[in-house]
Amino acid sequence: MKLKIAENILRLKPYKPGKPIEELEREYGIKDSIKLASNENPLGPSPKAVAAMQAAMGNLHRYPDGSGYGLVSKLSDKLAMPKQRIVLGNGSDDVIGMLTRVYLSPGDEAIMTDPSFLMYEIYVNTVNAVPVFVPLRHLEIDLAAMAAAVTDRTRMIFITNPNNPTGSYITTDAFNEFFQNLPPEIVVVLDEAYVEFATAPDCLDGLTQIAEDRPVVVLRTFSKAYGLAGIRIGYGIMPAAMAAMCNRVREPFNTNLLAQAGAAAALEDDDFLDQTRTLVHAELAFLQDRLKAMGVDCFPTQSNFFLIDVKKDADEVFEQMLQKGVIVRSMVSYGYPSYIRVNVGIRRENKRFLDALADVVV
């Protein structure tokens, strides 16, 4: 067929998520592999969320609540935010799509880091706007360089905090200085997918930046700390007027019945969240201490993952680790040819990772 395709769509770079364990085991003929590549919760899902989804199974013949009233109400109480400021999404990237459709027109510019979450670029290009890339500086977001990249066509800025894939973070003071010098028509999107893991006292909490007269949006997700990546549920917090516009373009029933039930229950499972944080911080210290003792360079992080400089081709290391049944993430496509990214697992998984890495790079 000879069908005309819009030029901005032809420019898109497809997002390539980490492959499921089952697919990799089929491809490589391996068994009993462990996956430390997608920043998932090593404890699995919240038990309360699983029970709530099982209870909701009997209503699968019904459409979900399109407004997600129950979940929005619980988020409102948990975050001390008015319900009118909360927009649910099929994953937080769904909210990114809403924001670009509402606030970007063809030719507008959106600033983001290089590297960053590829969906920023994809959604910006989809509406025929222009992504503007600002390199990281020493693995950290360079707010001064992002401010310098602003032009009269800039309409949106994406900031990931803590940052993926580097694990670095932005301080509250640095953000306030950055924001106060921005033109008022620019929307700042703070993607906080990993904020629950941050421990630095001066790490920016985006919720402190939400106000009706400030075009700031905070994105959060249930995929990481709450262990619900498989049901795709996230949300955005923003001024009520912005939320109302996003809801105009939001697909009906964009969050399914099981996702709403599971997320609402997960919000009440404080014990599980505490267990997750405790495990991640303990195992992160264990991994980094062991790697340093092995003479392997690794980098500090405010998330549940971190970078390792393996001093050789990261794609080759990825393949060699995979042959040993350990799945990590090569950072070659992110512009770091000798780095891999690994997320924290349980102790048994972390020991197996360390043993495999020692065989491959030490």
Image: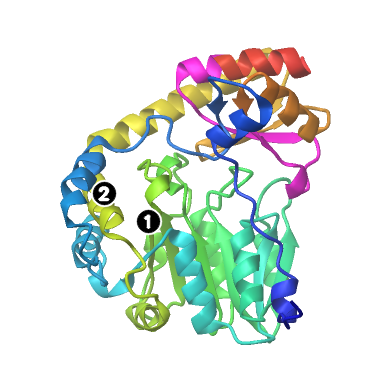
| Up/down of 21 relative to 190, above or below | above
Instruction: Tell me the crowding category of disc 2: few under 14, some 14 to 19, or many 20 or more residues within 10 angstroms, Cα based.
Output: many
Residue lying at 40% horizontally and 76% vertically, measured from the top left: 250
* Residue 186 occupies quadrant: bottom right
Q: Which residue is mark 1?
A: 233
- Please, which colouring scheme is shown? rainbow
Decide: marks 2, 1 in contact (CB < 8 A)? yes
- Residue 134's x, y, as percent? 73, 63
Residue 222: in sight, yes or no?
no
| Up/down of 289 relative to 119, above or below | above
Q: Is residue 336 left or right of residue 128?
A: right
- Residue 354's x, y, as percent? 62, 16
Residue lying at 23% horizontally and 57% vertically, measured from the top left: 60
Q: Which residue is mark 2?
A: 262
Q: For this rendering, which residue is in front, 76 or 229?
A: 229
* Residue 153 occupies quadrant: bottom right
Q: Quadrant location of the N terminus?
A: bottom right
- Residue 269's x, y, as percent? 23, 40
Q: Of the residues shown, which amino acid type is indicated by label 1?
A: Ile
Q: Of the residues shown, which amino acid type is indicated by label 2?
A: Gly
Q: Secondary structure at mark 1?
A: loop
- Residue 282's x, y, as percent? 44, 23
Q: Secondary structure at mark 2?
A: helix
Residue lying at 39% horizontally and 75% vertically, measured from the top left: 251
Q: Which residues are magenta?
A: 328-351
| Up/down of 102 relative to 222, above or below | below
